[in-house]
Amino acid sequence: MCGIVGLISHWKNSGFMTSQQKMFQQMLVADTFRGRDATGVIAVFKDGDFSIMKDANDAYYFQYDYEGSDIDKRMSKEGVAIIGHNRAKTIGDNLAENAHPFVEDKTFAMVHNGTLHNHKQIGDTDVDSHALAIVLKKAMDEEDWKKGLEEALSKVKGAYACVWYDQKRDQVCMVRNAERPLFLVKAGSNTLFGSEVGLLTWIATRNNEKVDDIINTKVHTLYTFDMKKTGGDFSETNLTLKSPKTGFDNGTSKHNNGSGSSSKTQQKATTHTSSATSKFSVGSADKPLSKSEYKRLFRKMVGSRIQFLADDYIELEVDRSSGMATKVLAWGECSNGAFDLCEYNHIIRCQIDLEQLGIDEQAFYEQEDVSLSGNVYDMAYIKDEQCAIIRVNMVELVGESNEAYVH
């Protein structure tokens, strides 16, 4: 989980006031709860120029470098908007160059909250967010940028809330899907935005700014702030996506995610392709799940133990000495022992301690499926996709087929 915060001034020519600088820095430090690994900012100036600063440090220490910096001083004279990011590392090492924002062509700077499950298919980058910045920048450069953006986001499998500054257009833009929040708060002569509405309203009111409006941004809608204008007004562009709107990889090969496996190993990774036609189907499951069927399954499954196949994963923790993942967030599909869940659209998610289970990550990475069992402790229903998310803990290896994975 990462966090986004930011502030757009409603006054173009005055620069950032001391109170605005103070509000932003307070938001950035408070947002540390969403990510302590790295911090970064995009500062936008009234002449259309922008600067970035980022480091692999939490916001508390980052602010000591930011305060009094050239960016800080210029913001007080020429600032019109500032975008901040607090990173909680998932994909890619915790290095300064892997912190947000990511800049493309020296004209496009973006921050991202979320994790992508197919980022190697989008771009050959160490960090999934960097790959997303590349494709979004390319989309916004197209003559029909709306079509380009729709096509780009249609290829994304994963969670995202993105905010970027496009210097060519002199615009601050933001878009999200259903898996990540993003709010706008109008307060006095400011528009605050960020991942947590409570944080935004708290910082505004504690700085004596009256909250005039709270906006929960719509899913798959591009919000555009024109920096050439004043007043904090924005436009909305509804986007039509053609692939899964929520982000789970329903049929991609396992990916390395900076775990230390060789490129040769990556090329050997197999691809599991679903034959189902539903856009959210997994394996043989191709039947949309109604809310009434979900309620029945919820009563029947929570508290039960099921067997399933872990089809893919992303790293959560890495052993620094070996470069190999020690804990992973795995997802997959039911194989048996789960009543009649198999026929419905579903995804199973669980966290696996590879060392505790004695699983070798490279073997796990190279193979297509790992047979596991676990306890269903919670479920969620995705209405738009008519799909169940099954959350599992107390995970164990099952079956003789798993011998290849064990040390």
Image (cartoon, rainbow, N blue to C red):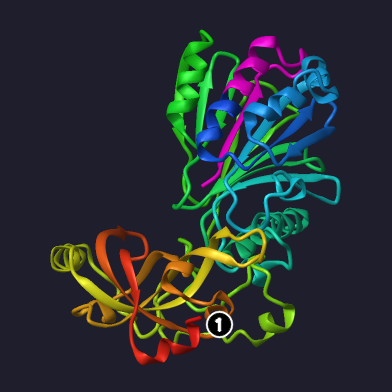
User: Considering depth in this image, is 99 or 342 the residue closer to the camera?
Assistant: 99
Q: Is residue 10 magenta?
A: yes
Q: Can you give x and y, in whole percent of width and height, for residue 332 in the image?
A: 41, 74
Looking at the image, which residue is at 13% across and 63% down? 299
Q: Is residue 128 left or right of residue 249?
A: right
Residue at the disc numbered 1 = 363
User: Considering depth in this image, is 147 or 313 the residue closer to the camera?
Assistant: 313
Q: Is residue 276 magenta?
A: no
Q: Which region shows up in magenta? A: 1-26
Looking at the image, which residue is at 78% across and 21% down? 72
- Residue 383, visible in the rendered structure: yes
The image quadrant that residue 268 belongs to is: bottom right
The residue type indicated by label 1 comes to Ala
Figure check: 172 above or below 391: above
Q: Can you give x and y, in whole percent of width and height, for residue 168 in the image?
A: 82, 43
Looking at the image, which residue is at 63% across and 71% down? 256
Q: Is residue 371 left or right of residue 149?
A: left
Q: Few, some or many C-alpha atoms within 10 Å of disc 1 (few <14, some 14-19, many ≥20)?
A: some
Figure check: 160 above or below 181: below
Q: Can you give x and y, in whole percent of width and height, for residue 262 in the image?
A: 72, 77
Q: Can you give x and y, in whole percent of width and height, for residue 124 in the image?
A: 74, 68
User: Considering depth in this image, is 48 or 402 the residue closer to the camera?
Assistant: 402
User: Considering depth in this image, is 248 or 31 the residue closer to the camera?
Assistant: 31
Figure check: 181 above or below 387: above
Figure check: 94 above or below 156: above
For mark 1, give the secondary structure.
helix
Direction top: furthest residue: 208
